[in-house]
């Protein structure tokens, strides 16, 4: 079961806007799952549309998180505010071992259960994970680099040795 479970049924979709908000316990569980210092808030405002046998959920995802700076390790508060467009589809007809090809539009599709249920909360949690910058740096990053002896990333990067050879005419 997902840390942020919000089940919906294709046959009983609410009309109008749907507001979802994670509880403090759910935020704490999501912080652990995504290796964040903490998740202060996670909310979404969405509207459902049906498209044949598929359900589209369109709206916005908003979150307030604290993650560690990739360089210094210091706490870095981050605000996320992103548009969402999720498409829930019936289970695929392909057998489990069959190889299938997906086009670009199909990559954002999420399969429903055979009964037409889908977990919008889990889809929102995964959308949050995709919105997090894994290499976010805070204001103390340059100081941490300098203390570690990394003055200029380009001077110490993977192409620094090649640049030195080029300068020697090799």
Image (spheres, helix red, strand yellow):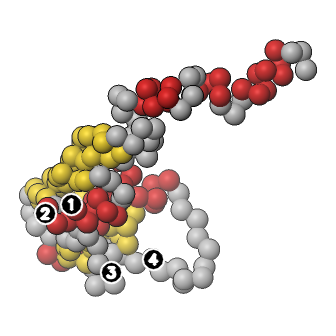
Q: Is residue 123 above or below residue 91?
A: above
In terms of image quadrants, where is residue 27? Answer: bottom left
Query: Could you say whether the residue bearing mark 2 is in a helix, strand or loop?
Result: loop
In terms of image quadrants, where is residue 144? Answer: top left
Q: Sequence-wise, which precedes: disc 2 or disc 4? A: 2
Which residue appears at 25% of the width and 66% of the height?
Answer: 29
Tell whether label 2 touches label 3 (CB within 8 Å). Answer: no
> What x and y, as percent, mark residue 37?
29, 52
Find disc 4 in the rendering and name its residue.
92
Which residue appears at 54% of the width and 83% of the height?
Answer: 96
Find disc 3 in the rendering and name its residue.
113
Query: Could you say whether the residue bearing mark 3 is in a helix, strand or loop?
Result: loop
> What x and y, as percent, mark residue 116?
27, 79
Circle 4 or circle 1, nearest the eye: 1
Q: Residues within 10 Å of mark 4 (few under 14, many from 20)?
A: few
Q: Residues within 10 Å of mark 2 (few under 14, many from 20)?
A: some
Q: Which mark is residue 27?
A: 1
Find disc 2 in the rendering and name its residue.
23
On-image quarter of the N terminus: bottom left
Circle 3 or circle 2, nearest the eye: 2
């Amino acid at each position: 079961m997902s840390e942020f479970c919000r089940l919906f049924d294709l046959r009983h979709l609410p009309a109008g806007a749907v507001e979802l908000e994670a509880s403090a316990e759910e935020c704490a569980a999501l912080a652990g799952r995504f290796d964040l210092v903490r998740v202060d808030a996670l909310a979404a405002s969405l509207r459902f549309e049906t498209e044949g046998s598929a359900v589209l959920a369109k709206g916005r995802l908003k979150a307030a998180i604290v993650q560690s700076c990739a360089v210094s390790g210091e706490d870095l508060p981050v605000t996320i505010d992103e548009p969402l467009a999720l498409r829930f589809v019936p289970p695929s007809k392909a057998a489990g071992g069959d190889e299938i090809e997906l086009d670009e539009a199909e990559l954002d599709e999420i399969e429903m259960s055979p009964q037409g249920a889908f977990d919008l909360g889990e889809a929102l949690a995964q959308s949050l994970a995709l919105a997090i910058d894994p290499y976010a740096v805070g204001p103390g990053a340059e100081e941490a680099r300098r203390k570690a002896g990394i003055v200029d990333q380009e001077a110490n990067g993977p192409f620094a040795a090649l640049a030195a050879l080029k300068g020697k005419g090799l």
